[in-house]
Image (spheres, grey):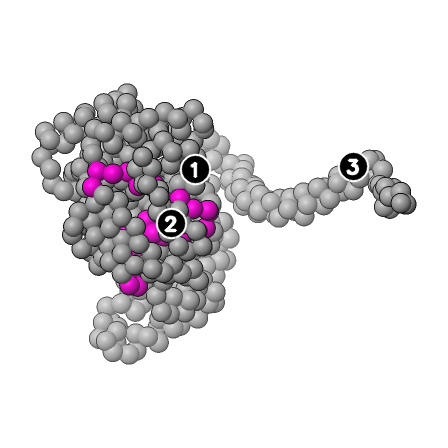
């Protein structure tokens, strides 16, 4: 469950105040708004990459407002993937597990499982250079899911993709959601993505959130 | 209702005059730029021609021309001189040491400057430019004066006019270039990657070591070679702070100066050519392995 309660964030001149939203456990929330409306700022606050000046953020019942991003346990897929240029796809999927001192055998099993789920088995030994946009996003998604986070945050993950690839990524995202049951917050400005994926939609208009729940 | 006047204002240039104007524009750019490139190449060619002339001269006077060409050309003569050999070794060792220390300082400094905002950052940035803009002799003199004051004065005898002074003088200028290069390298690495690494469970140090540093390796190579080349060319601070004592604090740039002082132009040119070769090697290494768009 993601609970954001009356948070205020400032990013330079830009200020957002009294923002609240709630995504119930296992649900898929989509946060929408125009470019520059502050969607990414809200996402960064949840991730802990940006300090909030007031309010509370709770993940699965735990207060994380002042917690370091490294211990919040959120899987993060940024807009352009932000893959690590020098690492193979396999290392991307294993990275979080190495950092968390998971044993070798479990890492191998997890990498195999993720690459099957995301259809990237044939890419495991390649580096990000030369991967297509869709492939990069699948690797970024795999890296974010690798440590089985309780929450997944996606920042316009499909915005740089062509229509056909976007279509397939949408299917993949809904499959992943069924398989993992991870609580997700997906930031986008695309209504189609919201229609296809969302359990609840949050519209950020003029610094205020309007919530609507889709059946 | 009056009709709208749709005539185009003014007069269009003729395609011929436009073509001529564009040709003149690019010709002017090429000539101005080309003159400088020609100057650089001409300088190197002059050195090489001088060398060839000297070699031919000794060949003409010798009964065994091929052996003379190999043994009596100014470079071989210079290489045979133990003083020059000492100077080459000291240059290689001191430049490498200065470049290594520069890199050790430049990596953290460049990272801090590139990623973090802190009070006094602009001032720090300006201070880092001082060794670049300061006249080299002043750097040397300032070092000399610094070592009159404690705690530096306590080690004055083992440093000033000794080999360590060579490395310190080279480092104090070369490091500024290395810092600039590393800052530019880190500026080009997407900070998102570190942020992702942090959300995956990394500490700041782990994100730096596992994600940022491997991506900065080319930039580190460039910083190292630039610092090395800068150290090799250092002369002013060395002369004042380390002296120009043969077989002690003599490096290649000092050798050129000392050879010129005793009127041995051939020797000076020969040592210069050795330095030109080293500089070209460094350039090739930087171009092949390093980052291309470093702005100093």
Instruction: Determine the CA span between mark 3 and mark 2.
Output: 59 Å
User: Residue visible at 20% across and 41% down?
Assistant: A25
Question: Which-is-in-front pick, marks 1 and 3?
Answer: 1
Which mark, residue B19?
3
User: Residue visible at 80% across and 39% down?
Assistant: B18
- In the image, are marks 1 and 2 on the same chain? yes
Q: Can residue B239 be seen in this view?
A: no
- In the image, are marks 3 and 2 on the same chain? no
Instruction: Determine the CA span between mark 1 and mark 2.
Output: 16 Å
**How many other residues sit within 10 Å of disc 3, few (<14), some (14-19) or many (≥20)?**
few
User: Residue visible at 48% across and 65% down?
Assistant: B133
Considering the image in quadrants, where does the C terminus of chain A appear?
Answer: top left
Q: What stretch is highlighted in magenta?
A: A25-54
- Outermost residue, top direction? A122
Instruction: Please say whether residue A215 is one of the residues in the magenta stretch.
Output: no
Which mark, residue A210?
2
User: Residue visible at 23% across and 23% down?
Assistant: A116
Q: Is mark 2 on a helix, strand or loop?
A: strand
Q: Is residue B26 visible?
A: yes
């Amino acid at each position: 469950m993601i609970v954001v309660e009356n948070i205020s964030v400032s990013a330079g001149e830009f200020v957002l105040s009294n923002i609240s939203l709630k995504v119930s456990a296992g649900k898929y929330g989509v946060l929408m708004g125009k470019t520059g409306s502050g969607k990414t700022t809200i996402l960064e606050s949840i991730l802990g990459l940006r300090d909030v000046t007031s309010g509370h953020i709770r993940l699965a019942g735990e207060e994380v407002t002042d917690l370091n991003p490294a211990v919040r346990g959120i899987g993060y897929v940024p807009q352009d993937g932000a893959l690590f240029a020098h690492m193979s796809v396999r290392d991307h999927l294993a990275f979080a597990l190495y950092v968390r001192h998971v044993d070798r055998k479990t890492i191998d099993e997890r990498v195999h499982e993720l690459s099957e789920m995301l259809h990237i088995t044939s890419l495991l030994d390649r580096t990000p250079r030369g991967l297509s946009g869709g492939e990069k996003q699948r690797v970024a998604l795999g890296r974010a899911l690798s440590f089985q986070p309780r929450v997944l945050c996606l920042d316009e993950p499909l915005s740089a993709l062509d229509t056909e690839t976007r279509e397939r990524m949408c299917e993949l995202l809904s499959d992943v959601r069924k398989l993992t049951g991870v609580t997700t917050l997906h930031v986008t400005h695309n209504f189609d993505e919201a229609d296809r994926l969302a359990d609840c939609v949050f519209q950020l208009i003029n610094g205020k959130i309007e919530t609507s729940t889709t059946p | 209702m009056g009709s709208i006047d749709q005539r185009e204002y003014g007069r269009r240039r003729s395609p011929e005059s436009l073509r001529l104007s564009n040709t003149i524009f690019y010709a002017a750019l090429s000539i101005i730029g080309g003159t400088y490139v020609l100057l650089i190449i001409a300088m190197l060619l002059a050195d090489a021609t001088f060398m060839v002339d000297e070699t031919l001269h000794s060949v003409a006077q010798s009964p065994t021309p091929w052996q003379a060409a190999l043994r009596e050309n100014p470079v071989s003569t210079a290489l045979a001189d133990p003083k020059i050999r000492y100077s080459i070794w000291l240059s290689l060792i001191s430049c490498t040491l200065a470049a290594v220390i520069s890199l050790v300082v430049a990596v953290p400094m460049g990272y801090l400057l590139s990623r973090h905002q802190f009070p006094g950052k602009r001032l720090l940035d300006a201070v880092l430019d001082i060794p670049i803009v300061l006249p080299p002799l002043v750097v040397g003199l300032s070092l000399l004066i610094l070592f009159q004051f404690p705690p530096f004065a306590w080690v004055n005898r083992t440093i000033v006019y000794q080999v360590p002074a060579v490395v310190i003088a080279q480092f104090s200028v070369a490091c500024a270039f290395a810092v600039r290069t590393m800052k530019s390298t880190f500026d080009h690495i997407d900070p998102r990657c570190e942020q992702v690494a942090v959300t995956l469970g990394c500490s700041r140090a782990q994100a730096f070591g596992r994600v940022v540093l491997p991506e900065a390796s080319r930039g580190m190579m460039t910083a190292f070679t630039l610092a090395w080349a800068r150290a090799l060319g250092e002369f002013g601070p060395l002369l004042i702070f380390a002296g120009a004592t043969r077989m002690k604090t003599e490096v290649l740039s000092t050798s050129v100066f000392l050879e010129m002082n005793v009127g041995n132009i051939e020797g000076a040119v020969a040592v210069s050519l050795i330095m030109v070769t080293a500089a070209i090697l460094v350039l090739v290494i930087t171009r092949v392995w390093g980052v291309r768009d470093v702005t100093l």
